[in-house]
Amino acid sequence: MLTPAEMACPYCGERIELLLDASAGAQCYIEDCQVCCRPITVQVTVDVDGEPHASVSAENDA
């Protein structure tokens, strides 16, 4: 099951929607911003209830 999450792009500041997959557990991956197309590092953690939470940073800030 994918969980939608709204985040602000660390480059352009626009709100983007990410789909988080809790079944994969904690993960870190690169996804391009849907607005400015720059690479964003997405860090996903899963809490004890199985809910995913994400934080984003610029590719070189991770």
Image: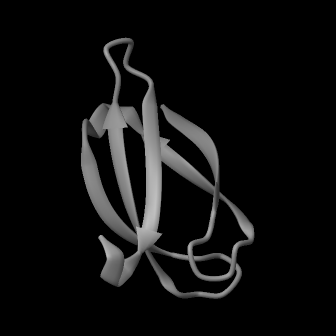
Q: Quadrant of the C terminus?
A: bottom left
**Percent x, y for residue 29?**
31, 64
| Residue drawn 62% across the image and 42% down it | 4
Task: In the rendered view, tell whether residue 28 sits above or below residue 39.
Answer: above
Residue 35 vertical placement versus 5 (above, below) = below
Query: Residue farthest to the front?
Result: 61
Q: Is residue 33 left or right of residue 59?
A: right
Query: Furthest residue to the top?
Result: 49
Where residue 44 sits: x, y (%)? 36, 46
Placement of 47 over or under 7, stated as above or below? above
Q: Eyeballing the image, is 20 above or below 47?
A: below
- Count up the numbered dots: 0
Q: What's the colour scheme?
A: one colour
Image quadrant of residue 51? top left
Q: Residue at x 34, y 76 (%)?
A: 61
Could you tell me which residue is drawn at 27 percent across and 57 percent down? 28
Q: Nearer the viewer, residue 37 or 61?
A: 61
Q: Quadrant of residue 16?
A: bottom right
Residue 19 in the figure: left or right of residue 21: right
Q: Position of residue 25 (x, y in %)?
A: 25, 36
Q: Position of residue 32 (x, y in %)?
A: 51, 78
Residue at screen point 59% across, 77% down: 33
Quadrant of the image occupied by residue 53: top left
